[in-house]
Image: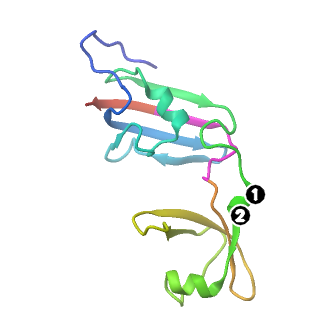
Amino acid sequence: MTTTTHASTPTVQPGSFLTLHYRLAGLAGDVINTFNEKPATLSLGAGELSPAMEELLLGLAEGTHTTFELVAGAAFGERNVDMMQWVARKLMNELGDPDEQYMAGDVVQFPTPDGLGSYAGAVVQVREDGAVLFDFNHPLAGQPVTFEVKIIGVL
């Protein structure tokens, strides 16, 4: 479904600041869906969406509501086995609460090396010695992705 627009309607360009609703879904359903809450705001090119998804937004007019189907691996790359890593319990204690109990499926935020940001890892397994196997792949890596978007505003 695409909304018709007039020639003076702003369109998404590299570096545009956007207000939008979007939904990302994989084989198991929605991973992100802002349609039932406050819309998202982002700056195109700032890395808040994958480059493949940002490319799809270019040229869309304000008011557009459309859905894209991306083939497996196109949105977030293929799954990378090197992104599965064991983290010692000692390091987990230093980074967080030493009494925390980790379970498969938990998502844990880690600080970036510069301390300015964070990244997430999903718990896959916990060993008897307390070490935790994390999957640092994006949850939709290696999957076909449905990307639904409604452009509310373009600056």
Tell me how far mark 1 sits from mark 2, CA to CA. Answer: 6 Å
Is label 1 in a helix, a strand or a loop?
helix
The residue nearer to you, when weighing 108 against 15, is: 15
Q: Quadrant of residue 42?
A: top left
Q: Is residue 71 above or below residue 10?
A: below
Q: Residue 103, percent across and down?
A: 64, 76
Report which residue position mark 1 lands on: 81
Q: Is residue 139 above or below residue 18?
A: below
Q: Residue 133, percent across and down?
A: 70, 72
Residue type marked 1: Val
Residue type marked 2: Met
* Tags 1 and 2 touching, CB below 8 Å: yes
* Magenta segment main secondary structure: loop
Q: Quadrant of residue 144?
A: top right
Q: Residue 86, percent across and down?
A: 70, 74
Q: Is residue 51 above or below residue 80?
A: above
Residue 146 painted magenta? yes
The residue at the point 43 percent across, 25 percent down is 58
Mark 2 neighbour density, 10 Å: few (under 14) some (14–19) many (20 or more): some
The residue at the point 67 percent across, 71 percent down is 104
Mark 1 neighbour density, 10 Å: few (under 14) some (14–19) many (20 or more): few
Residue 87 painted magenta? no
Q: Which residues are magenta?
A: 138-148
The residue at the point 62 percent across, 65 percent down is 122
Q: Residue 27, percent across and down?
A: 67, 44
Which of the numbered marks, if any, corresponds to residue 55?
Answer: none
Is label 2 in a helix, a strand or a loop?
strand
Which of the numbered marks, if any, corresponds to residue 84?
Answer: 2
